[in-house]
Image (cartoon, grey):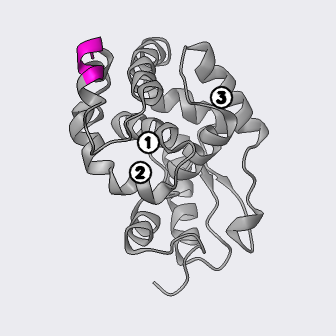
Protein backbone atom coordinates (compact mmCIF):
# COMPACT_ATOMS: atom_id res chain seq x y z
CA UNK A 1 0.00 0.00 0.00
CA UNK A 2 1.66 3.21 -1.12
CA UNK A 3 -1.03 5.83 -0.64
CA UNK A 4 -3.41 5.90 2.29
CA UNK A 5 -5.77 8.52 3.68
CA UNK A 6 -3.80 10.86 5.93
CA UNK A 7 -5.61 9.74 9.13
CA UNK A 8 -4.23 6.17 8.98
CA UNK A 9 -1.20 7.03 11.10
CA UNK A 10 -0.69 3.89 13.23
CA UNK A 11 -0.50 0.17 12.43
CA UNK A 12 -3.96 -0.52 13.83
CA UNK A 13 -5.49 2.47 12.02
CA UNK A 14 -3.74 1.45 8.78
CA UNK A 15 -5.06 -2.11 9.06
CA UNK A 16 -8.60 -0.85 9.74
CA UNK A 17 -8.28 1.62 6.85
CA UNK A 18 -7.02 -1.02 4.40
CA UNK A 19 -9.42 -3.82 5.26
CA UNK A 20 -12.65 -2.31 6.51
CA UNK A 21 -13.18 1.45 6.34
CA UNK A 22 -15.34 2.38 3.36
CA UNK A 23 -16.00 -1.22 2.34
CA UNK A 24 -19.78 -1.53 1.73
CA UNK A 25 -21.21 -3.66 4.56
CA UNK A 26 -24.67 -5.23 4.52
CA UNK A 27 -24.06 -7.48 7.51
CA UNK A 28 -26.42 -6.63 10.38
CA UNK A 29 -24.04 -7.76 13.09
CA UNK A 30 -21.21 -5.63 11.69
CA UNK A 31 -23.53 -2.65 11.21
CA UNK A 32 -24.68 -2.89 14.82
CA UNK A 33 -21.06 -3.19 15.96
CA UNK A 34 -20.11 -0.02 14.08
CA UNK A 35 -23.15 1.82 15.44
CA UNK A 36 -22.10 0.95 19.01
CA UNK A 37 -18.41 1.71 18.42
CA UNK A 38 -19.01 5.04 16.69
CA UNK A 39 -21.26 6.04 19.61
CA UNK A 40 -18.64 4.91 22.10
CA UNK A 41 -16.07 7.07 20.33
CA UNK A 42 -17.88 10.34 21.11
CA UNK A 43 -15.27 12.60 22.72
CA UNK A 44 -12.47 10.03 22.29
CA UNK A 45 -10.07 9.04 19.51
CA UNK A 46 -10.88 6.24 17.07
CA UNK A 47 -7.54 4.64 18.04
CA UNK A 48 -8.81 4.27 21.62
CA UNK A 49 -11.92 2.46 20.38
CA UNK A 50 -10.02 0.22 17.95
CA UNK A 51 -7.70 -0.84 20.78
CA UNK A 52 -10.75 -1.81 22.84
CA UNK A 53 -12.59 -3.52 20.00
CA UNK A 54 -11.92 -7.06 21.19
CA UNK A 55 -13.03 -6.03 24.67
CA UNK A 56 -16.26 -4.71 23.18
CA UNK A 57 -16.87 -7.92 21.24
CA UNK A 58 -16.44 -9.93 24.41
CA UNK A 59 -18.51 -7.59 26.59
CA UNK A 60 -21.34 -7.17 24.09
CA UNK A 61 -21.91 -10.82 23.09
CA UNK A 62 -20.03 -10.37 19.80
CA UNK A 63 -22.66 -7.75 18.90
CA UNK A 64 -25.52 -10.23 18.79
CA UNK A 65 -28.43 -7.75 18.75
CA UNK A 66 -30.90 -10.08 20.49
CA UNK A 67 -28.48 -10.93 23.30
CA UNK A 68 -27.51 -7.30 23.91
CA UNK A 69 -31.19 -6.28 23.90
CA UNK A 70 -31.72 -8.61 26.87
CA UNK A 71 -28.90 -7.12 29.00
CA UNK A 72 -30.10 -6.33 32.54
CA UNK A 73 -29.24 -3.46 34.94
CA UNK A 74 -27.04 -5.99 36.78
CA UNK A 75 -25.04 -6.57 33.57
CA UNK A 76 -24.69 -2.80 33.14
CA UNK A 77 -23.10 -2.63 36.61
CA UNK A 78 -20.70 -5.44 35.64
CA UNK A 79 -19.78 -3.68 32.40
CA UNK A 80 -18.97 -0.52 34.36
CA UNK A 81 -16.18 -2.53 36.03
CA UNK A 82 -14.81 -3.81 32.69
CA UNK A 83 -11.60 -1.94 31.81
CA UNK A 84 -11.54 -3.45 28.30
CA UNK A 85 -14.35 -1.09 27.18
CA UNK A 86 -15.17 2.59 27.70
CA UNK A 87 -16.69 2.66 31.18
CA UNK A 88 -19.34 5.27 30.59
CA UNK A 89 -22.81 4.43 31.90
CA UNK A 90 -24.61 6.49 29.24
CA UNK A 91 -22.71 4.82 26.40
CA UNK A 92 -23.21 1.32 27.83
CA UNK A 93 -26.93 1.90 28.34
CA UNK A 94 -27.17 3.42 24.85
CA UNK A 95 -25.73 0.23 23.31
CA UNK A 96 -28.51 -1.79 24.98
CA UNK A 97 -31.23 0.70 24.00
CA UNK A 98 -29.89 0.71 20.45
CA UNK A 99 -30.04 -3.09 20.30
CA UNK A 100 -33.73 -2.92 21.22
CA UNK A 101 -34.27 -0.22 18.60
CA UNK A 102 -32.51 -2.38 15.98
CA UNK A 103 -34.88 -5.24 16.81
CA UNK A 104 -37.80 -2.94 16.00
CA UNK A 105 -36.10 -1.67 12.83
CA UNK A 106 -35.51 -5.27 11.76
CA UNK A 107 -39.16 -6.16 12.37
CA UNK A 108 -40.34 -3.22 10.28
CA UNK A 109 -37.72 -3.14 7.51
CA UNK A 110 -36.51 -6.74 7.27
CA UNK A 111 -32.97 -5.91 8.38
CA UNK A 112 -30.85 -3.10 9.77
CA UNK A 113 -28.97 -3.14 6.44
CA UNK A 114 -32.14 -2.50 4.40
CA UNK A 115 -33.01 0.38 6.69
CA UNK A 116 -29.67 2.23 6.76
CA UNK A 117 -28.86 1.64 3.08
CA UNK A 118 -32.23 3.07 2.05
CA UNK A 119 -30.82 6.51 2.98
CA UNK A 120 -28.37 6.31 0.07
CA UNK A 121 -30.69 4.48 -2.31
CA UNK A 122 -28.82 1.22 -1.71
CA UNK A 123 -25.68 2.50 -3.46
CA UNK A 124 -22.56 4.03 -1.86
CA UNK A 125 -22.12 7.76 -2.41
CA UNK A 126 -18.77 8.41 -4.12
CA UNK A 127 -16.86 11.51 -3.05
CA UNK A 128 -13.68 13.00 -4.45
CA UNK A 129 -11.51 14.65 -1.80
CA UNK A 130 -7.93 15.75 -2.37
CA UNK A 131 -7.45 15.31 1.37
CA UNK A 132 -9.60 13.73 4.06
CA UNK A 133 -9.69 17.12 5.80
CA UNK A 134 -12.05 18.29 3.02
CA UNK A 135 -14.67 15.68 3.95
CA UNK A 136 -17.66 17.07 5.85
CA UNK A 137 -18.45 16.22 9.48
CA UNK A 138 -22.09 15.69 8.55
CA UNK A 139 -24.44 15.91 5.55
CA UNK A 140 -28.17 16.07 4.83
CA UNK A 141 -28.13 12.26 4.55
CA UNK A 142 -26.51 11.82 7.97
CA UNK A 143 -29.01 14.36 9.37
CA UNK A 144 -31.87 12.22 8.03
CA UNK A 145 -30.34 8.95 9.28
CA UNK A 146 -29.74 10.49 12.73
CA UNK A 147 -33.32 11.73 12.94
CA UNK A 148 -34.74 8.35 11.88
CA UNK A 149 -32.60 6.40 14.37
CA UNK A 150 -33.62 8.76 17.17
CA UNK A 151 -37.28 8.14 16.30
CA UNK A 152 -36.64 4.47 17.09
CA UNK A 153 -35.17 5.47 20.46
CA UNK A 154 -31.47 5.22 19.56
CA UNK A 155 -28.96 7.24 21.60
CA UNK A 156 -25.48 8.52 20.65
CA UNK A 157 -26.58 8.79 17.02
CA UNK A 158 -26.11 12.49 16.35
CA UNK A 159 -25.50 13.52 12.75
CA UNK A 160 -21.67 13.57 13.13
CA UNK A 161 -21.68 10.06 14.60
CA UNK A 162 -24.01 8.93 11.82
CA UNK A 163 -21.70 10.37 9.15
CA UNK A 164 -18.70 8.57 10.67
CA UNK A 165 -20.83 5.39 10.68
CA UNK A 166 -21.71 5.91 7.00
CA UNK A 167 -18.02 6.30 6.15
CA UNK A 168 -17.08 3.22 8.17
CA UNK A 169 -19.65 0.89 6.59
CA UNK A 170 -19.11 2.14 3.04
CA UNK A 171 -22.41 4.00 2.57
CA UNK A 172 -20.13 6.83 1.50
CA UNK A 173 -16.68 6.43 -0.04
CA UNK A 174 -14.52 9.16 1.51
CA UNK A 175 -11.12 7.69 0.70
CA UNK A 176 -8.82 10.43 -0.57
CA UNK A 177 -8.34 10.86 -4.32
CA UNK A 178 -4.85 9.32 -4.34
CA UNK A 179 -5.64 6.59 -1.78
CA UNK A 180 -5.15 3.06 -3.10
CA UNK A 181 -8.37 1.90 -1.42
CA UNK A 182 -10.62 4.43 -3.14
CA UNK A 183 -11.05 2.57 -6.44
CA UNK A 184 -11.44 -0.81 -4.72
CA UNK A 185 -14.28 0.51 -2.52
CA UNK A 186 -15.91 2.19 -5.53
CA UNK A 187 -15.74 -1.08 -7.50
CA UNK A 188 -17.37 -3.00 -4.63
CA UNK A 189 -20.21 -0.47 -4.61
CA UNK A 190 -20.70 -0.86 -8.37
CA UNK A 191 -20.67 -4.66 -8.15
CA UNK A 192 -23.42 -4.52 -5.55
CA UNK A 193 -25.47 -2.17 -7.73
CA UNK A 194 -25.08 -4.45 -10.75
CA UNK A 195 -26.24 -7.45 -8.71
CA UNK A 196 -29.23 -5.54 -7.39
CA UNK A 197 -30.23 -4.56 -10.93
CA UNK A 198 -30.53 -8.20 -12.10
Q: Is residue 171 left or right of residue 38?
A: right
User: Which contiguous range is marked in magenta?
Assistant: 70-77
Relative to 1, does residue 144 appear above or below in the rendering?
Answer: above
- In terms of depth relative to the viewer, which is nearer, 23 or 161? 161
Asked which secondary structure carries label 2, the reply is helix
The crowd level at tag 1 (other Cα within 10 Å; few <14, some 14-19, many 20+) is many
The crowd level at tag 2 (other Cα within 10 Å; few <14, some 14-19, many 20+) is many
CA gap, disc 3 and disc 1? 15 Å
Instruction: State the mark number for residue 37.
Output: 1
Give the quadrant of residue 75. Answer: top left
Residue for point 45% across, 12% down: 104
Asked which secondary structure carries label 1, the reply is helix
Q: Which residue is mark 2?
A: 49
Q: Is residue 170 left or right of residue 103?
A: right
Foreground: disc 1 or disc 2: 2
Tell me, yes or no, if residue 198 can be seen here.
Answer: no
Asked if the residues shown at circle 1 and circle 2 are in contact, with their CB atoms under 8 angstroms apart, the answer is yes
Residue for point 59% across, 73% down: 5
Q: Where in the figure is residue 122, as x and y percent of width and height?
A: 59, 39
Residue furthest out toward the front: 81
Give the quadrant of residue 64. Answer: top left
Instruction: State the mark number for residue 146.
Output: 3
Residue for point 38% across, 68% down: 12
Q: Is residue 75 magenta?
A: yes
Residue for point 64% across, 60% down: 174
Amino acid sequence: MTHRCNWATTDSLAHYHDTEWGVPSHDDRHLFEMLVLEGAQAGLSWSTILNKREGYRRAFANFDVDKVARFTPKQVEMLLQDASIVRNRNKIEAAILNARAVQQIRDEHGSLAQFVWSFVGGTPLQNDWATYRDAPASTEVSDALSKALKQYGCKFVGTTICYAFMQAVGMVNDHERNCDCRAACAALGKKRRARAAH
